Amino acid sequence: AALPAGTQAPPPTPHVFSDPAEIGALRRNLLAWYDRCKRDLPWRTLAATEPDADRRAYAVWVSEIMLQQTQVATVIDYYNRWMQKWPTLQALAKASLEEVNELWAGLGYYSRGKRLQEAAKKVVSELAGRMPRTAEDLQKLLPGVGRYTAGAIASISYGQATGVVDGNVIRVLCRLRCIGADSSSPAVIDQLWDMANALVDRSRPGDFNQALMELGATVCVPKAPLCRECPVKQHCRAWRRKLFGKPTPVPDVEDCGVGGCPLCPPAMEPWDSSLGVTNFPRKAAKKQPRVARTATCVLERRGCHGAPEYLIVQRPSSGLLAGLWEFPSLPLDQDLQEEKQREALADHLRAWTGWPVVAGGLRFVGEVVHIFSHIHQTYVVYSLPLDGDVTLDPALTPSRWVTEEEFHASAVSTAMKKV
Ligand code: SF4
């Protein structure tokens, strides 16, 4: 029968959980596994033991922001130092951006730290220091908090029965229900949020969400998932399909069997039995990163105790690596020849330091490649020893001389440390 205007057809049954008994069993199996196998992580301990809801929410929030794009193993140390330095929202709201950048140095995606601090200020000044108490309000009121982070904070800190969808959850759910359409498309993402909200355990939502993510991080991993050890394999349609092979030409419950299913793998790239469960999820081809070249110069002088010092300058307060420090650098045109790029850099340094820098005085040191999320950046590195002082015009750009040790303690990016 035709659907009323404005309503969408329900997803075909192989791609959803429709049996309440199966949902109950999946929750129990997943939570029992989580209780046995979960990793001990500092934010989990805090969320489980801290009686104050605002402090719990703050602790989970910090961990979630750090964990976006960064591995758990790397985050732990940063997290502990952060919480030691700023144990509460109020403490963070008083911090300077410089301090935040210094602590964040090396973690990447620097705007995360900046936004966290701005949002903390907002909670203190506009919300009387009280964290919003639902996922909806967290997302609405806190800058930098998206649907995922809001759901994670609300479920883990407040016990709100709301699901979460991150990269790990996408992988697990797509495999559980053989969803092979582009997993970054809005239609699939909406479907996965509905599924996550339907599955989340009502009495232990925070644990359930963490269990699902943990399963994706440790068992249902991208390349070689450990299906035999998986606590939810009996609910997994990808696993069943791998075991029993290609479905028969007569469609059965394991396959939509109808062309044009919006959640099945596209007809052009059907199930490939050599891939097994890793047929899912599928993603549209990624955009190629932009290729960029930057000339950078390490200016060196003898400091007052004879130890070498290096000049670093601060980047603008917005854009890529906002507010971080770097060696004086100059973006280069793509196909500039070596000689020309050296001249361009010399001109730049001359204008900027007032010193009679000549291209021939710049020593070529080597090239450093660093991949930012969307930029394939090559730094062409030169050095220039100076035997006198340089006075820089502070109106042009903030700068300072640092020893090697001071350099490493400054708010500098990983790319600059490589340089
Ligand atoms: Fe992932 Fe395999 Fe478990 Fe399915 S059975 S959820 S593919 S680990």
Image: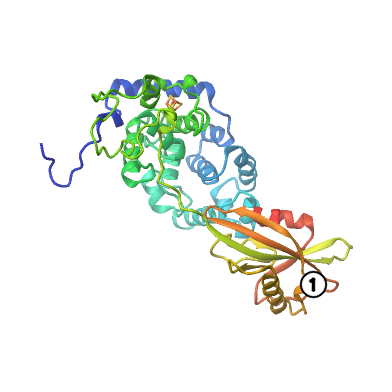
Q: Is residue 8 left or right of residue 340?
A: left
**Position of 174 relative to 346 (above/below):** above
The residue that label 1 is drawn on is 361
How many other residues sit within 10 Å of disc 1, few (<14), some (14-19) or many (≥20)? some
Query: Which residue is farthest left?
Result: 1
The quadrant in which residue 24 appears is top left
Q: Which secondary structure lies at badge 1?
A: helix
Q: Residue at x 89, y 62 (%)?
A: 305
Location of the C terminus by quadrant is bottom right
Amino acid type indicated by mark 1: Gly
Q: Residue at x 31, y 35 (%)?
A: 264
Ligand 1's quadrant:
top left
Location of the N terminus by quadrant is top left
Q: Residue at x 38, y 48 (%)?
A: 137
Q: Is residue 39 left or right of residue 344?
A: left
Rendering coords of residue 135 (x, y %): 39, 44
**Position of 341 relative to 17 (above/below):** below
